[in-house]
Image (cartoon, helix red, strand yellow):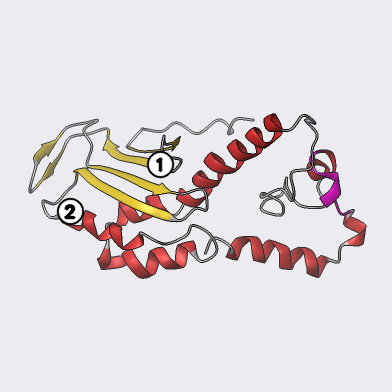
Amino acid sequence: MPLPQAVRREHIHTRQINFTGYEREDGWFDIEAHLTDTKTYAFSNNWRGTIEPGEALHEMLLRVTINDKFQIQDIEAATEHSPFSICPDITPAYKALIGVTMGPGWRRVIRERVGGMQGCTHLTELLYPMATVAIQTIKPLQNHRRKLADSDSKAHVGRPFVLNTCHAWAETSPVVKENAPDYYVPSERVPVTVLNEADQAAKESTE
């Protein structure tokens, strides 16, 4: 369902962010991110001179290499366009995340190692969604291959990794009842306090 019709307005700014997941020939995975910021008008920059409409003020790229356990094996960061000449100097700092596992505490570790003055605001912002992009890259592929490898297409594949992570995948949801009936819990059997605790746990898992 689209957004309601907006009032008459003028396009000013565009931020585009693209995430892509790859499986490498060595069995590891690359999760890549690309961010650009552009304006619809020309403006002056002390270092670059005039920045024309559609020309990137910010353009940052990030590649995080992980194994199938979501442990970071390598990171490459690049700043192609920036408002200041010294912006690219901080990109090597992201190597500090090598060895970290994407999982509980992911956001906290990012803040500790490359947050604030230890990193670039835009590169660091790209890291936060990396964990969910990695999950979407790896887990469905593993499940797909597991099903193909088993002669019974309805073979039990264990607890869904998305269980209780959103409204649709709540254990009381009809989605779970249909797709993972072994883990479905009728809502009348779950106290409200337990539901609230589950929501909080799901939130904290990426903080």
Residue, disc 2: 87
- In the rendered view, would you say 27 is above or below 151? below
Q: Amino acid at mark 2?
A: Cys
Q: Position of residue 163 (x, y in %)?
A: 71, 51
At x 50%, y 44%, the residue is 133
Q: Is residue 117 left or right of residue 154?
A: left
Which of the two residues, 138 or 164, is positioned nearer the viewer here? 138
Q: Is residue 1 left or right of residue 154?
A: left
182 within the magenta span:
yes
x and y percent of residue 85 in the render?
Answer: 10, 51
Element type at mark 2: helix
Residue 188 lies in magenta, yes or no?
no
Q: Which residues are magenta?
A: 179-185
**Label 1: which residue?**
30
10 Å crowding of disc 2: few (<14), some (14-19), many (20+):
some
Q: Nearer the viewer, residue 194 or 182?
A: 182
- Secondary structure beneath dot 1 equals strand
Q: Earlier in the sequence, mark 2 or mark 1?
A: 1
Tally of numbered discs? 2
Residue 144, image x, y percentages: 65, 33
Residue 92 position by quadrant: bottom left
Q: Quadrant of the N terminus?
A: top right
Of the two numbered discs 2 and 1 in the rendering, the one whose residue sits closer to the viewer: 1
User: In the image, 51: left or right of 183?
Assistant: left
Measuring from the top left, give residue 28's x and y in whole percent.
44, 43
Disc sitting over residue 162 in the figure: none
Q: Which residue is located at x 30 percent, y 66 percent?
A: 116
